[in-house]
Image: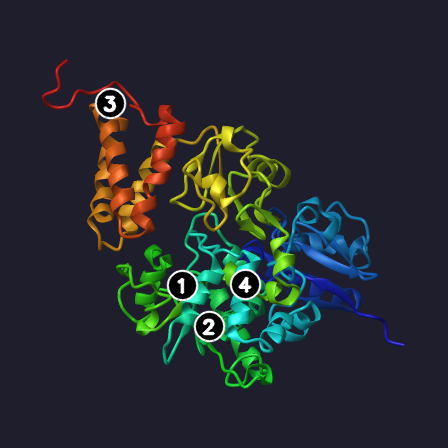
Amino acid sequence: MASKRTRIYVPSDTTARSVGADRVAAAIADEAARRGVEIEIVRNGSRGLHWLEPLVEVEVGGRRLAYGPVSAADVAGLFDENFHEGGAHPLALGETDAIPYLAKQNRLTFARVGLIDPLSIDDYRAHGGFRGLENAVKLDGAKIVEIVTESGLRGRGGAAFPTGIKWKTVLDTQADQKYVVCNADEGDSGTFADRMIMECDPYVLIEGMTIAGLAVGATMGYVYIRAEYPQAIRTMREAIARAEAAGCLGANVLGSGRAFHLEVREAAGAYICGEETALLESLEGKRGMVRFRPPLPAIKGLFGKPTVVNNVISLATVPIILDKGAEFYKDFGVGRSRGTLTVQLAGNVKRGGLVEIAFGHTLRELLEEFGGGTATGRPIRTVQVGGPLGAYIHPSKFDTPLDYEAFAAFGAMIGHGGVVVFDDTVDLGQQARFAMEFCAIESCGKCTPCRIGAVRGVEVIDRILAGVNEEANLTLLRELCDTMVAGSLCALGGMAPYPVMSILDHFPEALSARGPKQRAVGEVA
């Protein structure tokens, strides 16, 4: 009787590969062959415990046991200790699901990430995949929109606009053609959730976009992926081809007689193309510049047609809502922030990675229980939440619940869920300057407050740090920030002042002269 082959999981996503996962997989295959051990290597996605990558899992007795971080040099020693049978080793972490970092999470959108072979439709179905779509094809568009609206799902790309309301606008707008566009131009600092979905569970995004198409009457969809994600682009294209071959996409979705086609488009490499109207311009083959609104994209979007534009996480969350119902999803969260938030811990943090938890947990819980404090062991001075346009949050606000309205109340935002940690050595004066410089570089140039304001912002901050007429320039900086917030055409110029204002309000000592104060020309001594 043939011996049973041991299944060993080695992640294949960009994060794990960047720290040697491919070499580890090759070393395991070579060592097993040399020893005559029968194994099957499955290249799964990352579990999101990035400080432990490459995280190797061994399936023993129906359980998955974790070892990590594993290097190719560790492989022989692992086999010496019979790790393929669950043997003890210094790198052994026990049952993967019992690791506190994972056990404390509420994995809904990321329920399959790290569990399956990303491109295996059989794996996807075995773990609940396409059940939401199977329910959706039995419903009319209005009912699907009603379920999504009732769930309380809001956009996870930054604006947090209710997904169901956007879909209803597209549904109610008459047109001969409608579109679904996925914004996968993940450009915020410290964010990688979109990439992990596309590389580790691509069918959940395909399923979510197809449900959106059925809901609003769209027959064509586009996934707009940032050019810096070559593996995500390859994986999504292959997954779309396989989904079409399996009848989950195309002219006859799951035999329903309803059509939905999907294509990948590579982004233009500009941060501004993460703004939905600039993205649409880019998709149409034009320079990525912000459009005036109204009309909204939901009424006049891609090629002038009604268009759903949602972030990856928003669309990838739809399948579980259609599978388990609006009430199931709505049961997670607080206030108007329903469901779960995918938080990405990055920067100077001991345990960086992805955490999916219900809204209502606090920032302190994330930083201490999941992040484990700073990598340097020094005190946390601040965290920036929501990307390069997010506020720098003072430790006094760390007990604020993760809730869109609670964060907005003190001038902050949750955005895409990126959390970048800084210890007490950070130069927040330079961080304020970076916010304005980033806006100046990335501005599309269409509106004056953003195009000119950001350049002037850099100049004013430079004068403050140099000690030139400091008080007057601090006043000028606040006035400039107010003008940019009130007058910019889109969120790039409108939110670039947020980091600066948060430093002015909560870390005023950071925006002060770095040397002997200088007098401006004409200033009285």
Distance of label 3 from label 4 (alpha carbons):
51 Å
Foreground of the two, 475 or 85: 475
Marking on residue 216: 2
Mark 1: which secondary structure?
loop
98 sits to left or right of 325: right
Q: Where is residue 500 in the image (x, y as percent from the top left)?
A: 34, 36
**Which is more foreground, mark 1 or mark 2?**
2
Report the quarter where the N terminus lies: bottom right
Q: How crowded is mark 3: few (under 14 residues within 10 Å), some or many (20 or more)?
A: few
Q: Earlier in the sequence, mark 4 or mark 2?
A: 4
Residues at circles 3 and 2 in contact by the CB criterion of under 8 Å: no
Apparent side of residue 307 relative to residue 27 in the rendered image (left or right): left
The Cα–Cα distance between marks 3 and 2, rounded to whole angstroms, is: 54 Å
Labels 3, 2: front one? 2
Q: Do the residues labelled 1 and 3 touch (CB within 8 Å)?
A: no
Mark with earlier residue (3, 2)? 2
Q: Which residue is at a point 70% across and 48% down the rendered structure image?
A: 103
* Residue tagged 1: 227
Label 3 secondary element: helix
Q: Name the residue under label 4.
A: 148
Q: What residue type is labelled 2?
A: Val
